[in-house]
Amino acid sequence: MLEVQAHQQLKHLLRGSAGHWEHELTLSRLVGRSLRRQDRTRIQLSAGSNARWWLALMVPLALQSRHTVLVLDALQQQRLLQVERPRLMESGIRLSCWTGDLPPPGDQLWLVTPQQLVDLHRDGRLRPQDHLVIPAAETLASRLRLAMALQIDSVHWEQLRTAFPAAGEGLLELHERLSRQVASCGTGTDRDIAMPESALTRVRDLLQLLGSTPAPWCHLMALDQSSWASWANWNAKTLQWSWHLQPLEPLASLERMFSTHPWTLLHGDGGCRRHGDSTETSDDALHIDLRDVPRAEPIPLYLPRRQPLPNTEIYSSHLLEQSRRLILGRTGLTVVLLDPPGMRQRLCSELAAEFGSRVTLESTAPEVNGVICCRWSWWLEHQHQLPAPDQLIAAMLPIASLEEPLTAARVESLKRQGKDWFRTLLLPEALAKLIPAIAPLRQSGGRLAMLDGRVRGRSWGEQVLRAMEPWEPLQRLRPE
């Protein structure tokens, strides 16, 4: 059977190597079983295991690559072709890869990006027996959302006027009217401004009169307005704007693809499921938990009992004072996690005035005792390129802001459905970022500082604390 062959091949490949992952052989067998049986399988891995599944996944795929579609983004494809595939070839395991937009002519493994997956499904080029294999599936929804996104710039308006000169005056008048609406909401800084529903309605009414239109206008006509977010990105320097549209829940629009094809998903988020992440359309999906057994040593957690809330005037000074105390005397890497750009840049400048050049803003080349101020998303993307941190300072939880048009549109959709939008959407997505972000501390033995007063001051703070277990309270700060 395929799973036995995969187990034997991987065991031979790992022979003599030290420190390999304890679940590698098990994962290889499970992937082989899913490919052989054409199952729908969801495998849950621990947070922070994104770099450990490569061999266990690729060995069964090398043995059974026919009618197998591996969905990887550009960076993942680069790693596969430049690192993992040569490693397999050196061990005598052949892996043929196909990267075209049409199905491979032979037994090659079909590599596609999320953008290609959307196009293949839309154009009906996926074969019924194609098995979808999607690692890092916890980010699938966000990757598909970006792949399905539409952006309309001034050049697209000009192309439309060129294609339909008879409607040029009407198109120009409509564009100027929308520009005035956007400009009236704009300020002296670049920002995203939610577009009114009437804007899309007026544009589509005019496009219907024109008939067949070029991209991206033809895609604009096909989308369901109620399930898409629409906003304008205002450039204060050029006084220009671009129109952005993204689906609220992209997996919902691909429901038919997941219901008609077998698939294997690897989740590396530690079990924190985001709203809209579900791909199951029936109850025949197999769920397997391969998370590591929690370490006996809990994370030291510094969480003062009385902290101001992020929307108070004294919060910025609280962040600065606490960050100074936490950084003072530390000999290892400190990472300060804070999403609001203005607050992050100000805190970085104030810490640099205190600690000098060791403080950087989103740098992958810090000093040994450096301090990196960064966004949560930046840390999740680059943590594998950096040394294990001595401490993480969570200045503010990664709860999405309602000022972001996409978040506001998703919240409004949940309100219309009568759902608790905070506990359904914002809190689960924040925890799905928090758990992988602190995972390196479990290997390095570093400490975590939570400076967000909402953890103690809100009822949902208990859910945050449970998600971070095991941890132990750190009552006093001691320099090394």
Image (cartoon, helix red, strand yellow):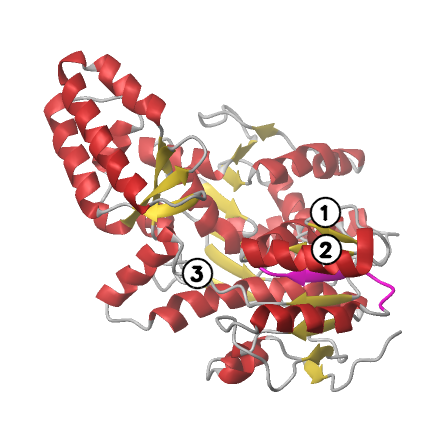
For label 1, the crowd category at 10 Å Cα-Cα, with few meaning under 14, some 14 to 19 and many 20 or more, is some
The picture places residue 133, in percent across and down from the top left corner, at: 52, 46
Q: Which residue is mark 3?
A: 401
The picture places residue 206, in percent across and down from the top left corner, at: 13, 29
Q: Residue 152 versus residue 235: which sits nearer the camera?
A: 235
Q: Which residue is mark 2?
A: 372
The picture places residue 73, in percent across and down from the top left corner, at: 55, 39
Query: At 38% across and 33% down in the image, what residue appears?
Result: 239
| 36 lies left or right of 148 | right
SS class, disc 3: loop
Does the magenta portion include 355? no
- Amino acid carrying label 2: it is Ile
Question: Spatial distance from mark 3 to mark 2, Cα to Cα?
Answer: 23 Å
Does the magenta portion include 336? yes
The picture places residue 253, in percent across and down from the top left corner, at: 31, 47
Q: Taking 479 as reference, is 140 above or below it?
A: above
| 239 lies left or right of 381 | left
